[in-house]
Image (cartoon, helix red, strand yellow):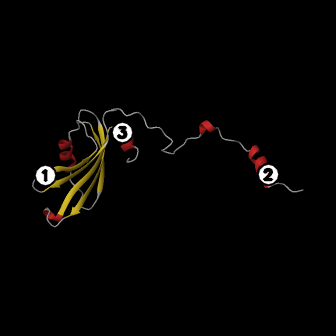
Amino acid sequence: MSINLAQAYCSVYSQMDKPDPGALIVSDPAAQETPPHPHPQKQDFILLSEFAEKEGPIKREVIGQPGSFNIETFVVRIMSVAQPSSEQDWQAVLEIASFPEISYAYVHYTNLFDLHARGYVRPIAFAYITYQKNKIMDHFP
């Protein structure tokens, strides 16, 4: 008497305890819904800034629409930090509560080597600014 492999599998599977589908948690980020934007008219944006030798902290490029966000004050704030001397690149996650609305930023600092810059390095910062806390805090604890 020969037993079909598929029949044997089905009979064993039917005797097993099946998990409750409601107890399963899906960890796929694409399957999770994004909560509604707290400020529908405000969009996320990217900011490139540098510490220029003569002008001090200045913005170089803004990608996106910052709206009423005070970019000049933010650039001074992120470029006025003391960089650890042992690290070439480093990151910071900020909660910006001093502006009219709370926003969040991921800032990546680096130095570009430049023969014409002071000390032969040009400190720059790439910042991603958003109004949704989960976009930053969930990915950069």
Q: Amino acid at mark 2?
A: Ala
Horizontally, residue 56 falls left or right of residue 78, namely left
Residue at the extreme right = 1
Please tell me whether mark 1 sits on a helix, a strand or a loop: strand
| Residue on which the image places disc 3 | 133
Between marks 2 and 1, how big is the CA–CA gap? 75 Å
Query: Of all residues shown, which one is farthest toward the bottom?
Result: 115
Answer with left or right where residue 52 lies relative to residue 138. Answer: left
User: Residue 101, how many percent across, how many down?
Assistant: 27, 33
Q: Position of residue 52 (x, y in %)?
A: 14, 55
- Residue 90 point in image, percent of width and height: 29, 56
Measured in 3D between alpha carbons, the distance from the residue under mark 2 to the one under mark 3, in whole angstroms, is 51 Å
Read off the residue under disc 2.
8
In the rendered image, which residue does mark 1 sit on? 56
Label 2: few (<14), some (14–19) or many (≥20) C-alpha neighbours in 10 Å: few
Measured along the vertical axis of the image, is residue 87 above or below residue 7? below
* Residue 80 visible in the displayed image: no
Residues at discs 2 and 1 in contact (Cβ within 8 Å): no
**Vertical comparison of 41 with 71: above or below:** above
Decide if residue 56 is on the left or right side of residue 135.
left
Residue at image coords 30%, 35%: 42
N-term-proximal mark, 2 vs 1: 2
Q: Amino acid at mark 1?
A: Gly
